[in-house]
Amino acid sequence: MGRGQMPTGRRERAKKEKIERIMTAARELFAEHGVSGVTTQQIAERADVAIGTLYLYASTKAELLIMVQNDKFADAIDEGLAAANAALGQALPEPVVALIRPVVACIREQTENGRTYLHELVFGDPDEPYRRAGLALSARLEDAVTGLLTRGESIDAADAATLARVVTAIIHISTTATVYLHRSDDAVLADIRDQIDAALTARHRAA
């Protein structure tokens, strides 16, 4: 090993520590000021890294937001899955509502951040690694809704998958549309429940 070179193990630990500092700084600043009120320079300064170092891990502020929100989104899905499993004995749509309750709270915790995150996932480059990870989480949520819809109901897999896409679209509009921003989480969830009920009722009538 040449003089001045850091051993691989130490180099990897240093890289991990820098990423953790950047993530912590971004999470704190986005929570305090919203994504529009924060600069990448501020994140770099709070993380105690050079701006060039920050750009090695995320080339834009949007990517930093996606990194932060992906972690929160994943935790919300895990929490929702546990709640949905506990509600499996109840009639639809209650297990589905139990699943999406933490997701709605996650998106609306800091409204600007949640709206920007979903916008970036929908309209950003799907091949960018952080967006790809976020889209995989969205697919995981949709798959979970599909699974709940096929449990104990006369809904086949194809129809359940279609209804799950309807549900995720309802979540997106209900949590990001400007006209709904004044509503509480409970009010948003009640509206989502009503829309899911209507979709299920229409499906049963058609069947």
Image: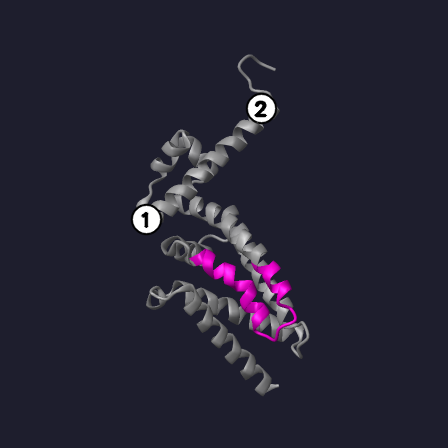
Check if residue 64 falls in the magenta segment.
no
95 to the left or right of 108: right
68 to the left or right of 87: left
Mark 2: give few (<14), some (14-19) or many (20+) Cα within 10 Å: few
Amino acid tagged 2: Arg
How many numbered tags mark residues here? 2
Location of residue 83 with respect to 22 vertically, above or below: below
Residue at left offset 41%, top offset 31%: 52
Q: Main secondary structure of the magenta part?
A: helix
Residue at left offset 54%, top offset 68%: 97
Start-end of magenta stretch: 80-107
The kind of secondary structure element at disc 2 is helix
Amino acid tagged 1: Ser
188 to the left or right of 87: left
The kind of secondary structure element at disc 1 is helix
Q: Which one is in front, 157 or 17? A: 17
Location of residue 205 with respect to 199 vertically, above or below: below
Q: CA distance from mark 2 to mark 1?
A: 35 Å
Label of residue 36 in the image: 1
Mark 1: give few (<14), some (14-19) or many (20+) Cα within 10 Å: few
Quarter of the image for residue 204 reads bottom right
Mark 2 or mark 1: whose residue is earlier in sequence? 2
The reply to whether residue 128 is in sight is no
The C terminus, quarter of image: bottom right
Residue at left offset 52%, top offset 48%: 71
The N terminus, quarter of image: top right
Tell which residue pokes out farthest to the top in this image. 3
Label of residue 10 in the image: 2
166 to the left or right of 82: left
Check if residue 97 falls in the magenta segment.
yes
Label of residue 150 in the image: none
Coordinates of residue 80 in the picture (x, y in percent): 57, 60
